[in-house]
Amino acid sequence: MGSTPLSKPVLAIITAAFGFSWGFVIVKSVTLPPVWIAAYRLALGATVLSTASALTKTKFPQFSKWVVGAGIFFGLHQILYIEATHRTSIAVVTVLGAAKPLLVAFLGIWLLKERPPKAFYGWAVVAAVGVVLLVAPKLMAAETHWQGDAIALVNLFVLALYYIFVKQCRVSGDAPTLSLTASIQCIGFMTVIVPALVTGFKLPSLTNFGLVALIVVGPANAHLLVNWALKKVNAAVAMLLLGLIPALASLWAYLILGETLTWIQICGMAIVFVAIGFAQMLPTEDVA
């Protein structure tokens, strides 16, 4: 079945992209060690979502290997994503992230027996080219940080596996979005807190706590929208729609922070928007 333009699941993912798009800047502004940013972010997110699940009497999913795996991969993603953002340029993290739709597509064929429509591959490549053009000036100006780049690469695989596991949770059983996301964040916190405590306890300043809370309110809760949509949307197509993130982040930097946009970047942004525009009209359900 094909999707209608801006169907509810597609709209949910595009809305999530808006939330994710300003997470990089906030994370970069927090002065805590990355593992403690992840720990506080997950603790606060897990508390809020678990409380909401209890108040709404939402049934919690059984702790299957898919739920536990999703939580572990999410916790690892939080550490790696924040560590990479602190150690290397956001441009590098963004460029590597452009490969996520294709990686999720290949993993989905292997692990989920899920095949995206054939046109997906073409638009995924077009979107990746747009992302590269979009961040090219920053990428060329950035210093080489091999450790940060390597961490960003590992994070790409961990994040892809996280989405694969969430997709399986959503289609294989009764896993309500709210309680599933709460469970994932609880497991993620337990994954993160041990290495965090090994590094020594770090108490956040009021400013740092406020920034972490801001992450939970915006970018972190965008995961709710993606997790809800994954029940209806092919995981690889969902990742392609999230390709809006770098374009939107660059736009906010221009409008709010006064950063310049070159013609190359504007062309890259236009290519991304065109690719996403056509991608949201692709069939969104699994293709046998």
Image (cartoon, helix red, strand yellow):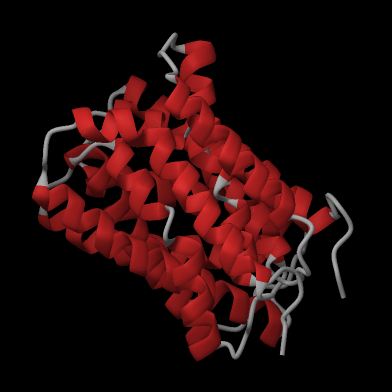
Q: Is residue 83 above or below residue 252?
A: below
The front one of 136 and 87 is 136
Q: Taking the image as drawn, is residue 64 in sight?
A: no
In the image, taking residue 208 as reference, residue 160 lies left or right, namely right
Q: Is residue 82 above or below residue 103?
A: above
Q: Is residue 272 above or below residue 159?
A: above
Task: Kindly identify the residue that appears in the image at 22 percent across and 33 percent down.
Answer: 140
The front one of 121 and 31 is 121
Q: Is residue 46 above or below residue 245?
A: below
Residue 261 place in picture, x, y as percent:
44, 18
Residue 72 lies in quadrant:
bottom left
Residue 25 place in picture, x, y as percent:
39, 29
Residue 273 lies in quadrant:
top right
Q: Which quarter of the rendered picture does the C terminus lie within? A: bottom right
Residue 258 lies in quadrant:
top left
Task: Kindly identify the residue that appears in the image at 11 percent across and 40 percent down.
Answer: 144
In the image, taking residue 211 as reference, residue 151 lies left or right, namely left
Residue 57 place in picture, x, y as percent:
77, 63
Task: Kindly identify the residue that appears in the image at 65 percent across and 76 percent down.
Answer: 116
Q: Taking the image as drawn, is residue 5 in sight?
A: yes
Task: Kindly identify the residue that appears in the image at 63 percent across and 49 percent down.
Answer: 275
Q: Which quarter of the rendered picture does the N terminus lie within? A: bottom right
Q: Residue furthest top?
A: 258
